Amino acid sequence: MRWSVFILATLVALAFDASLGTILRIGESQPRLVLCVVVFALLSAPRVHAMRIAFLAGLLTDLLAPVIRPDGTQLVVIGPWTLGFALGALAVVPLRSLLYHRNPISSAFATGVFAVLSAVVFVSVWVLRMLVLGDETPSWWPGTNAGEVVRQAKSALASGALAVPAIWVLERTRGVWGFSTAKRVIPAVSREMP
């Protein structure tokens, strides 16, 4: 896997989400292209790189997509998406053996699972931060925590729908990513015919 291609694709996806991503908004749910890129990499890259992929993409998301506070200020908190992407990766990597990873429909399912788990951790970290610091309000204030989970779940479904065309396009660039296509051969005793 070429890390430079992954980092560039993640940065392009984050830029798309911040600028043109609002065009794809349906109601209050906005799909996120960065989730599609991460799931594509998780389904195709070697398993040993899965957590590195998730942590790096989560860190870039935390750094480059700050939370807009109710008073209009920006707040960068490292952790909510980083930990969320890690949990999402822990769920998607075991799904690799069950899903045909070159099929956009199965990749959309994996993106939905990844997005829901990431969103739950995102909200949990913000609630924990609010409880520890006491005076901090979450980014979705004056809404409720459960309302934010529902909003994030709707966005996860929208990201799963966006994954169908996004994964199809990313499949066309598979050669650039440098994913290994060799399968491991396990030697076994062959049967003798009587």
Image (tube, rainbow, N blue to C red):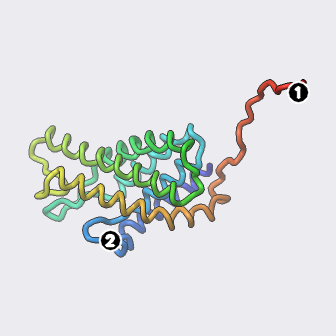
At horizontal 14% and vertical 53% (from top left) the residue drawn is 144
Q: Is residue 110 above or below residue 48?
A: below
Please indicate whether residue 180 sits to the left or right of residue 105 in the image.
right
Estimate the x, y position of residue 138 in percent, counting from the top left.
17, 52
Real-space Cα distance between discs 2 and 1?
63 Å
Q: Amino acid at mark 1?
A: Met
- Answer with mark 2 or mark 1, whichever residue precedes in sequence: 2
Q: Locate residue 4 relative to residue 126 in the image: left or right.
A: right
Classify 10 Å Cα crowding around label 2: few (below 14), some (14-19), many (20 and above).
some
Q: Secondary structure at mark 2?
A: loop
Q: Nearer the viewer, residue 176 or 76?
A: 176
Residue 40: x, y in percent?
Answer: 53, 54
Residue farthest to the right?
194
The image's mark for residue 193 is 1
Question: What amino acid type is highlighted by mark number 2?
Answer: Arg
Q: Which one is closest to the eye, mark 2 or mark 1?
A: 1
Residue 53: x %, y % from top left: 49, 46
Label 1: state its secondary structure. Answer: loop
Q: Residue at x 51, y 59 (%)?
A: 105
Q: Residue furthest bottom?
A: 23
Q: Which disc, if any, is residue 25? A: 2
Q: Residues within 10 Å of mark 1 (few under 14, many from 20)?
A: few
Q: Looking at this view, is 103 or 20 the one in front? A: 103
Decide which of 22, 91 is in the foreground and name it: 91
At x 74%, y 35%, the residue is 185
- At horizontal 52% and vertical 48% (from top left) the residue drawn is 42
In the rendered image, residue 159, in percent from the top left (x then y), is placed at: 39, 61
